[in-house]
Each structure stands twice: as structure tokens, then as C-alpha cells.
Image (cartoon, rainbow, N blue to C red):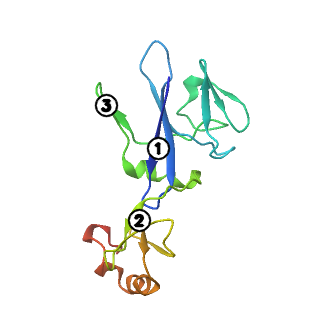
């Protein structure tokens, strides 16, 4: 069975991924983005015991899911599991943002004045410290660009 999930990045980008047990007789997970380097982010469907690329219709050999190449889903690296849970670090999910195009509307906070707005309504945004920051005005955007270290937590500052 294919288990689908969506992780929303700080800029609102929806990163889809799925987990599948690759073998019927033993537990061996494939943990992958719901996208392909060849066909893009149309994703995959499971019909019966077949995983199929929506874009091109190719049937994926299930034991190969989690391995790069061809029309296989893009693998997610550095995940781990034990008998109770499977853990995927957020930084690994963040590596998938460029495979997807859907942007969700999320509430964000202007780091300069603390006002709340949505990512999709903000006219000004800026990437700094591995995060996308949104601003309610051009003045706040310019203040941030001049001295971002004044507005972001110490652990997110660029050297």
C-alpha cells in the first residue's frame, strides 16, 4: 500500500511524498518524493499492485522504488525507522521543493513589524538563512535587506 503525505515549506510550497513497502514478504521501505526527474510533479498512482507514473503511464517495478533513475520517483535521503516510527528530517524534505509547483496559502509573520499576512498576498519576499521571509510593506522589506541579522534568530543568521 502506498501512503501519501504533504509537507508545506516555509514559502508555502507543497512537497508531496510517499512511503511504500517494496516487498510483500518483508519490511523494506521506499521513501520518495511524488515526482520524477523526467516527467515532473504529476506524481504516481497505485492501481491494484502496480505503481504508475501519471504523466507517461509507465509501470514502476515496486522493489526499485527508492532507487534513482528512469521514471522512478525521486528518492528521499537520510530517513530512518525503527519498529515504531519512520522519521524524515525536515531538511531532507526541503530538498524537494524544486520538484513541485503547487503553493499553499499559509499565514506568515513580517519579521520587521510582527504583522500577520499570507505568503500569497505578500508583495515582498526575501530568502535569507535558508528561509523565505515575507513583508507587509516595501519599507519593511528594505529594512530587512539592509540588516537582516537584526530581525532573525541567531541560529538562522548567515555568516
Query: Marks 3 and 1: in contact by CB < 8 Å?
Result: no
Q: Secondary structure at mark 2?
A: loop
Q: Earlier in the sequence, mark 2 or mark 1?
A: 1
The answer for how far apart the CA atoms under marks 1 and 3 are is 17 Å
Disc assigned to residue 159: none
Query: Marks 2 and 3: in contact by CB < 8 Å?
Result: no
User: Which residue bears the numbered disc 2?
Assistant: 130
User: Which residue bears the numbered disc 3?
Assistant: 85
Which tag is nearer the camera, tag 2 or tag 1? 1
Task: List x then y, in percent, for residue 49.
Answer: 59, 18
Q: Earlier in the sequence, mark 3 or mark 2?
A: 3
Residue 71 in the figure: left or right of residue 158: right
Q: Is residue 153 in view from this perspective?
A: yes
Q: Residue at x 44, y 52 (%)?
A: 8
Decide: is 82 above or below 73: above
Q: Secondary structure at mark 3?
A: loop
Decide: is 143 above or below 51: below
Task: List x then y, in percent, for residue 75.
Answer: 52, 40
* Viewer-closest of 107 and 85: 107
Outermost residue, right side: 56
Q: Secondary structure at mark 1?
A: strand
User: Which residue bears the numbered disc 1?
Assistant: 6
Which tag is nearer the camera, tag 1 or tag 3? 1
Q: Earlier in the sequence, mark 1 or mark 3?
A: 1
Question: Callout 3: 10 Å neighbours few (<14), some, many (20+)?
Answer: few
Q: Residue at x 40, y 52 (%)?
A: 91
Task: List x then y, in percent, for residue 95.
Answer: 48, 52
Task: List x then y, in percent, for residue 82.
Answer: 30, 28
* Viewer-closest of 113 and 94: 113
* Viewer-closest of 8 and 19: 8
- The quarter of the picture where the C terminus appears is bottom left
Residue 22 in the figure: left or right of residue 61: left
Amino acid at each position: 500500500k502506498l501512503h501519501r503525505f504533504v509537507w508545506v515549506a516555509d514559502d508555502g510550497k507543497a512537497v508531496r511524498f510517499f512511503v511504500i513497502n517494496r516487498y510483500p514478504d518483508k519490511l523494506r521501505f521506499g521513501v520518495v518524493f511524488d515526482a520524477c526527474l523526467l516527467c515532473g510533479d504529476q506524481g504516481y498512482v497505485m492501481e491494484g499492485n502496480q505503481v504508475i507514473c501519471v504523466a507517461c503511464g509507465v509501470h514502476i517495478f515496486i522493489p526499485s522504488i527508492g532507487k534513482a533513475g528512469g521514471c522512478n520517483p525521486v528518492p528521499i535521503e537520510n530517513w530512518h525507522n525503527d519498529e515504531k516510527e519512520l522519521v524524515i528530517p525536515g531538511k531532507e524534505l526541503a530538498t524537494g521543493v524544486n520538484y513541485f509547483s503547487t503553493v499553499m496559502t499559509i499565514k506568515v509573520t513580517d519579521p520587521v513589524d510582527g504583522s500577520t499576512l499570507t505568503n500569497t498576498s505578500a508583495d515582498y519576499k526575501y530568502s535569507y538563512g535558508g528561509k523565505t521571509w515575507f513583508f507587509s510593506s516595501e519599507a519593511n522589506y528594505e529594512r530587512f535587506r539592509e540588516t537582516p541579522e537584526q530581525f532573525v534568530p541567531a541560529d538562522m543568521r548567515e555568516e
